[in-house]
Amino acid sequence: MHSQSKSIPLWQDKYKRQRLSQFIFALVVIILTALIYGNIVDSLSKIGMIPSLKFLRMVSNIDIGESVIEVSNTSSNLRMIAAGFLNTISISFLAIIVSTILGLIIALCRLSSNWIINKLAVLYIEIIRNIPLLLLLLIWYRAFFLRLPGIKTGIMAGERLGPNGETLLSFSLSNRGISMAWFKPNEHFQPWLIALVLSLVVAIGVLIFLKRREKLTAKEQRTILYPTLAFLALAVISYFLLPNAALTKEIPVMGKFNISGGLHVTAEWFSLFSGLILYTSAFIAEIFRAGIQGIPKGQIEAARSLGLSHMKTIRLVIIPQAKVVVIPPLTSQFLGVAKNTSLGVAIGFPDLFAITGTIINQTGRALEMIILVMAIYLGLSLLTSLVMNIYNRRVQIKER
Amino acid sequence: MALELQHDPFKTPREIEHPLLYWVHKNLFSSALNTALTLLSLTILYLLVTKSLIPLFSWDWTVISANLKLILTGSYPMDQLWRVWFCLWYAALFFGLTFSMNRTRPPKVMYLILISILLLALLNFSLFNKVSMLATALLLFVSFFVGTQLAQQKKTIMVAGGWILLLPLSFFIIRGVGGFLPVVKTNLWGGLLLSLLISLTSIFLSLPIGLMLALGRRSSMKVVKSICIFLIETIRGVPLITILFIGYLILPMALPQGWSPSVFIRALTGVVMFHSAYMAEALRGGLQGISRTQYEAATSLNLGPTKTMAFIILPQVLKRMIPVLVNSFTSALKDTSLISIIGMLDLIGISTSIVSNPKYLSGSAQVLFFEGALYFVLCFSISKASMVLEKKLGVTGNIKK
């Protein structure tokens, strides 16, 4: 054996050949990377810069229109990035939930036997899927919001004079966005928050109890309905039982230049949000439709011949099977939403990417910022696919 | 004597008597819920038509007709426009030939293209452009009917060669070469022309790069495999706009001193990088669809791994991938709109520069709607064409079920 392997020439020994070519490949990649890095450092040093992360601690001088956390133009660049990241997260989270619901409704319309509803759904899906998202966002922002009148002359409802002579509003729609009356937490909020956490604990307890009973009795339990009801009931009861109301109704007040108080949704946020849900829901609708139509007709006929009602067929036969097919493409749609939020930069929504762009403009730290932002998006993608993979493994039909 | 049925035995008497009424009842008013839904959607439809569709006609659309040339070709020199037309004629020629494969009558898509061209010709173009437009439509149909007369084998070679030549030829003609054709610099390209060129090029270039990445990912060599996985997953995990920024900001730094790529090249690099990763995943799917018996048969014929790939596996994969490729062109066309964010004057970017002219300040909605219609017609007809191709090429033999 030993002598034989020695007699094989190098270029005919598959094992050695592979190792050699791998080595050469790795070498080429390393040399290329080093060359590129050297070039970058070279061109940076020409303008007197060396790659470093010190700029993250410096004052940003950026003003952004909206943020989940408190920021001002004296906040550090790092805090600005955090603000942008939270904006991205919050808008994509909301958009994912709303577009999934909307997508389900459109998919049902698409599958309806009603001719006109069916055709309307087809029209919606085909139009949205063949238009770039960027165009949708621009249409919302430039063709809708920017054409609206200013706040003084915008569309208003429930105008009235307040006790101090100021103008109160219930609702306002203008080129700045939407304002409406809203309940906001006040200084008595903390006790109710504790009550909310306790009700959540109770709801989870109910869920665990029902799951256990389901296993013991082998009878289907309402594992979604009862815990939800328990939570809602406890939350409402505790709100009224507490001596001080935890929420106060805030009414928007018309100021000199803008509207203060109440819930204010900026034009940028609303354009991005509605663009995202319109776009994503059309794709999600097609995923749901494919999932439902992919179920063999025999399954439904079998369910019917077992005497299951229409609703039970959907709940017990169609949904469990469609769920398995639908989840992988749905995951990539959800990831797509988080990535598509970056298009907010075109309409001035301060998401992670827009803030990155501004910081690059101000500090010139393109290399560091792009690597940082890519790492954040990659982390987000990995996290989402991890969660969805765990869920996917749980709903996967177990085969022996 | 054979029994002759006067009516279709599967139809009820009511259906035969009043087919229209029966259809309306069955499809619109079969139950209380259905009736309610029908009425609801009729109301929505009525509101849509009266509140948004009809007011559209009362808008001032002069912003479109005044800037039509800008929207379609950007600042491309007027006197050189025939070069763009030439490329379009070439494309029309091979579109017609492609459609004539395996069929004798024009498909619906061709009529859709004809109608859109005729509608476009109604707008106020110069006589030369109108004639060129009609010539495009004429060429499409003539090449179709000529194609039906040609032998299948000959046609296949012609079509394949024609499509491969399309892009290099277009670049050669549209950009021009010093001495032969006057050079039109890339910063003058714009509008639909730029969007189409960038997305077409990105598909053409991302195919070989994606193929290498896909083969690398399936390789048994661990180093190659992990590098390919790293590249593919990194690009797929981040938004396109970050990749575009890499091309825009990092590429000029990463290249040796003195090389300063134009914005066009920088944008193209970003788009190609992005699409290569997605193309790699699509191709990997195609490669996985090939049955193992194909590899075994090739081995038993004493073909090495390279020859197996080149002569047995890839031809099958690529043939299967044609509809996917055509479809990925629509997503490339849509994605390309993002290059406007890095300042290119593509279909979207040009709209910003048009409405920044104080004369057309109020026309932004019109421009955006017109561009939306352009995108829709293009993407919709391409995706329909890919469906036609998918049916025609079929998934035949040797494919793992």
Image (cartoon, coloured by chain):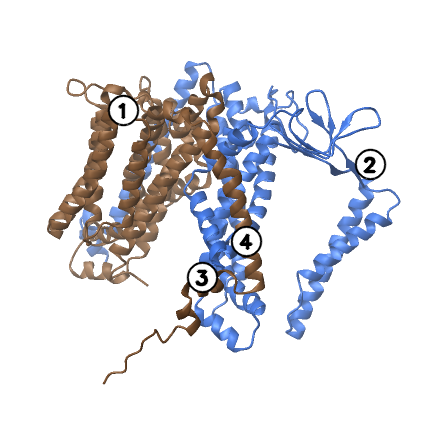
Spatial CA distance of label 4 from label 3 is: 15 Å
- Residue B222 seen: no
Q: Which mark is residue A187?
A: 2
Q: Are marks 2 and 1 on the same chain?
A: no
Check disc 1 and give the amino acid type.
Ser
Check disc 4 and give the amino acid type.
Ile
Of discs 2 and 1, which sits in the foreground? 1
Q: Are marks 1 and 3 on the same chain?
A: no
Spatial CA distance of label 2 from label 1 is: 70 Å
Q: Are marks 2 and 4 on the same chain?
A: yes
Q: Which residue is mark 3?
A: A293
Of labels 4 and 3, earlier in sequence is 4
* Dot 4 and dot 1 residues touching (CB under 8 Å): no
Spatial CA distance of label 2 from label 4 is: 40 Å
Spatial CA distance of label 1 from label 3 is: 50 Å
Colour assignment, chain A: blue
**SS under mark 3:** helix
Q: How many marks?
A: 4
A298 sits left or right of B385 in the view = right
The chain under label 2 reads A
Label the brown chain with its letter: B
Q: Are marks 4 and 3 on the same chain?
A: yes
Of B386 and B228, nearer the camera is B386
* Dot 1 and dot 3 residues touching (CB under 8 Å): no
Q: Which mark is residue A105?
A: 4
Check disc 2 and give the amino acid type.
Glu
Q: Is residue A22 above or below residue B80?
A: below
Of A108 and B212, nearer the camera is A108
Q: Which residue is mark 1?
A: B126
The chain under label 1 reads B
